[in-house]
Amino acid sequence: MGALPKRVIGARGDPDTAAIAHFVTPRCDRRFARHVGGTRASRVLSRLQPVWFVPSPSQLARGARWYRCDVVALATADAMARLPRRTAGVLDAGNALDSWGLCSTTAPSRVGHRVICGRPHSWRAFAIIRPGAGSRWPSSAAFAAARQECKARARAQQGYPLRWTYGWQRPSRSQWQDGRRWGYCWAPVK
């Protein structure tokens, strides 16, 4: 919970939604990271997400200036998971992603089958891989190298078998522009 400064509200009570989002999002992201714990990678690999709320335009016009940061868990694309009574440090446990991780009921190349790992699944995202450094869109060679890194990690994840399978999902251009500068490396669950 915090207070919105007048500069982000907008003139004459007309909310400046871009300014509000620009102010609230990084603050809630930082609070989320401190609250749920874990590493940056475990937070990215989890189905836990920060969400925030602000007053309605009519409440802003009447002087409300609060904002609130919450945690949600996405069970599926269109359903929330029940959170424990206390979410502080929920990702600090070594096995936290067994319950809260990003999994899929089908091969990850099929869109729309992502689930929280606490539900039945056949694939699991186990690593994030950055295809290059910086903010510039990576080259084809950088994406190919990231794919090879994923392939090697997936083989190790599966115990170095002679035959193995894996999934690599690189970010789209729009995801990259929105700040998601990593891809997901997947392996089937035994």
Image (spheres, rainbow, N blue to C red):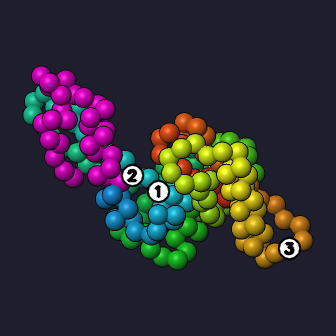
Label 2, secondary structure: give it. Answer: strand
Measured Cα–Cα span from mark 2 to mark 3: 38 Å
Q: Main secondary structure of the magenta part?
A: helix
Circle count:
3
Which residue corresponds to the image point at 46% horizontal and 68% vertical from the top-left? Answer: 39
Q: Nearer the viewer, mark 1 or mark 3?
A: 3
Question: What residue does disc 3 label?
Answer: 161
Question: What residue does disc 1 label?
Answer: 48
Residue at the far left in the pictured view? 63
Q: Nearer the viewer, residue 134 or 152?
A: 134
- Whether residue 23 is visible to the viewer of this picture, yes or no, is yes
- Find residue 166 and report its horizontal and vertical position in percent: 77, 59
Which residue corresponds to the image point at 29% horizontal and 52% vertical from the top-left? Answer: 27
* Crowd class of label 1 (few under 14; some 14 to 19; many from 20; radius 10 Å): many
In this rendering, the answer to whether 98 lies above or below 133 is below
In this rendering, the answer to whether 94 lies above or below 25 is below
Disc 2 marks a residue whose amino acid type is: Pro
Measured Cα–Cα span from mark 1 to mark 2: 7 Å
Disc 3 marks a residue whose amino acid type is: Pro
Magenta region, residue range:
1-29
Mark 2 or 3, nearer chain start: 2
The answer to whether 183 appears left or right of 85 in the picture is right
Disc 1 marks a residue whose amino acid type is: Leu
